[in-house]
């Protein structure tokens, strides 16, 4: 028989996005749309390393910095001949619509086919945020959030992440 404290601790870990079994992005579920408004399934990333973050499209400071760092990771990968997927998931289903991401992508010249900008329903976004270890909350009309960029394995597990703007981006290469 399992001790009640162990059961409570296991339940708390599961609520925080951790679990006693490996969790991966592909089993997180939800309905996703890409920046062209097409249905997108996260399991289509399976088989390749993926660099992922969550962002708030209306954010002009932290999220723009996150994307600039992801672009630097893309350059580092290119220099080494590595093929990576890059995924940006919108934190606010009400504000981060496919048309907004298409404009965001176009304005920042992020047009390579290995980059995805996704919008999902609130539950799906919360599950992915938990998986990546990103906390977020509303503050007035804005969505505030942790800074984190993660490297996912080909089977969708978080291998490692950076959570500081001055972090060594080479750690995000497989």
Image (cartoon, rainbow, N blue to C red):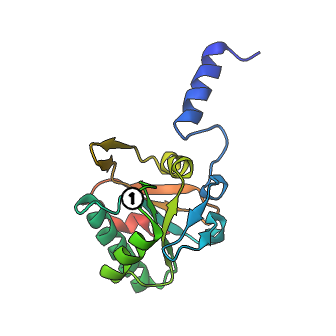
For label 1, the SS is: loop
Residue 99, above or below 93? below
Image coords of residue 110 (percent x, y): 38, 80
Q: Is residue 18 left or right of residue 86?
A: right
Q: Is residue 145 left or right of residue 37?
A: left
Residue 108 in sight in this render: no
Q: Nearer the viewer, residue 123 or 95?
A: 95
Q: Residue at x 64, y 59 (%)?
A: 26
Q: Nearer the viewer, residue 26 or 21?
A: 26
Image coords of residue 90 (percent x, y): 43, 60
Residue 56 in sight in this render: yes
Q: Residue at x 42, y 48 (%)?
A: 134
Residue 5, above or below 155? above
Residue closest to the far right? 1
Please give the count of numbered marks on the rendered protein: 1
Residue 12: quarter of image: top right
Quarter of the picture holding the N terminus: top right
Q: Nearer the viewer, residue 117 or 19?
A: 117
Q: Residue at x 60, y 15 (%)?
A: 5
Residue 82, above or below 62? below
Image coords of residue 35 (percent x, y): 48, 74
Image coords of residue 43 (percent x, y): 66, 65
According to the image, label 1 marks what residue?
95
* Label 1 packing within 10 angstroms: few (<14), some (14-19), many (20+): some
């Amino acid at each position: 028989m399992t001790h009640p404290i162990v059961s409570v601790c296991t339940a708390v870990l599961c609520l925080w996005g951790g679990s006693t079994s490996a969790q991966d992005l592909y089993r997180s579920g939800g309905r996703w749309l890409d920046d062209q408004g097409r249905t997108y399934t996260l399991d289509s990333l399976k088989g390749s390393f993926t660099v992922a973050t969550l962002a708030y499209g209306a954010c002009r400071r932290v999220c723009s910095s996150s994307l600039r760092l992801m672009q630097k990771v893309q350059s580092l990968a290119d220099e080494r001949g590595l093929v990576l997927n890059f995924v940006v998931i919108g934190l606010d289903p009400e504000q981060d619509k496919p048309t907004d991401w298409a404009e965001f992508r176009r304005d920042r010249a992020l047009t390579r086919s290995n980059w995805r900008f996704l919008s999902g329903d609130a539950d799906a976004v919360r599950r992915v945020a938990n998986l990546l270890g990103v906390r977020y909350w509303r503050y007035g009309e804005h969505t505030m959030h942790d800074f984190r960029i993660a490297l996912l394995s080909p089977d969708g597990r978080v291998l490692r992440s950076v959570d500081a703007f001055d972090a060594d981006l080479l750690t995000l290469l497989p």
